[in-house]
Amino acid sequence: MAATKTYRPIALFVLTCLLILVGCKNEPAKKTPEQIFEECASGVVLIYCEYYYSLTLPTGQTMYMAGLGDDGELVHLTADVNAIKQNTNRQFGTGFFIDSKGDIMTNRHVVDISLDEFDAQEKIAASLRRERQTYLDSMDMARQAYTKLKAKKAECYSLDFLGNVYVTNQEMLQKINTAMAAVEEWYEGWRNLCNFISANSNPRAIKVRTYSKIGIAYNETYVDDFDDFLGENACVVRKISKCENADLAIIQLKNKRTPESAYVFDVSGMVVREKESKSFGEWFNQVSFGEATTEESEAEDLKIDQQLYMIGYNHGIAIAQTREGIKAQMTSGKITQLPDGERLLYSIPTMQGSSGSPVLDADGTLRGVNFAKATLNDDFNFGIPMNLIKNFLKE
């Protein structure tokens, strides 16, 4: 009897402790912004893209341009391929690794710089017509230059006392002949161009081709030249979204290997949470040994005023460059409009170069991809939500 009385307080004590332990759920600790950045920044890369275009006319003449201006004018039009390579377009964006095969997600407009062929042909033909007088003037300048070179060439010859012609300055003669050949080539090019314009040829006969190079740089690495992006970090465009409202693309490292040190973002839209103990064994292991089981579940719907973070390269290399190499930036804001399945609207401030940045919640879960400012002069920005990202990956 005495033994029973002795064990009763102990049993009550143990039962009380167990009830307390059951009532205490192990809520996962919230990550700080510093922890999110430290964990994810290695997987966010600075994307560099350089490009130009070639125009092949029905005359067989090939010309080059950097692009089309807002007014439809041809930017840096030239017949010299080396000249256009000195005036190539350059732009920056942000991307992030999504698997171990070197795949990087970003915005379509960061890496897809191809022109709408029909629209480009019309604008090119119209611009050429507007500039016809300029080309005629160029022909006239070429004629004048040729005449002067021809006169200068005559100075390289002389007559001996028998009336025989001989060269007095072979080096100068060779330079003049080279210059005259170049002027003749320029003149013929402008003449063919003017003939094409005068004939009012079909714009559809103009062939437009895009030349581009894409590469990346990693957070906390040194970049001294554009070639640093295009060496071992060169990429190819692997996939472009076909959906108009999903500004998404995937580029891939040419070696098809994500660095082991780079963080890989989960693009499944799922999160790992602690599973509730449904059996005595699970409960006992969790209480006794801290062995909590986990399960995957859909991320909760975003809510008004919910905190979001973005890791990216605002303003490209200009701000990223530091004494310790390039560094990504982390900016934050809140949901300002309930998502409609087509876009997120948040108050995260951005600059050009942040396109393609991952947008994360307070747990570090991917919730979208940044792609555009709401207007040019505010800090409201749009992101592509997870449902469109998952649809894109299924395309």
Image (cartoon, rainbow, N blue to C red):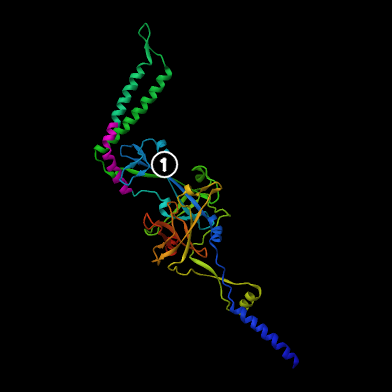
- The quarter of the image holding the N terminus is bottom right
SS at badge 1: loop
- The quarter of the image holding the C terminus is bottom left
* Residue at image mark 1: 88
- Residue extending farthest top: 161
- Residue extending farthest bottom: 1
Q: Is residue 305 above or below residue 287?
A: above
Amino acid identity at mark 1: Thr
Near mark 1 (Cα within 10 A), the count class, few <14, some 14-19 or many ≥20, is some
Residue 301 locus on image (x, y percent)? 45, 69
Task: From the image, give the main secondary structure of the stretch colored magenta.
Answer: helix
Q: Is residue 290 above or below residue 249?
A: below
Q: Left or right: where does residue 257 sit relative to residue 315?
A: right
Instruction: Name the residue rendered at 28%, 35% in the picture.
Output: 134
Name the quadrant containing residue 209. top left
Residue 318 locus on image (x, y percent)? 47, 47
Name the quadrant containing residue 17. bottom right
Q: Left or right: where does residue 138 sit relative to residue 358?
A: left
> Range of the magenta residues?
117-137
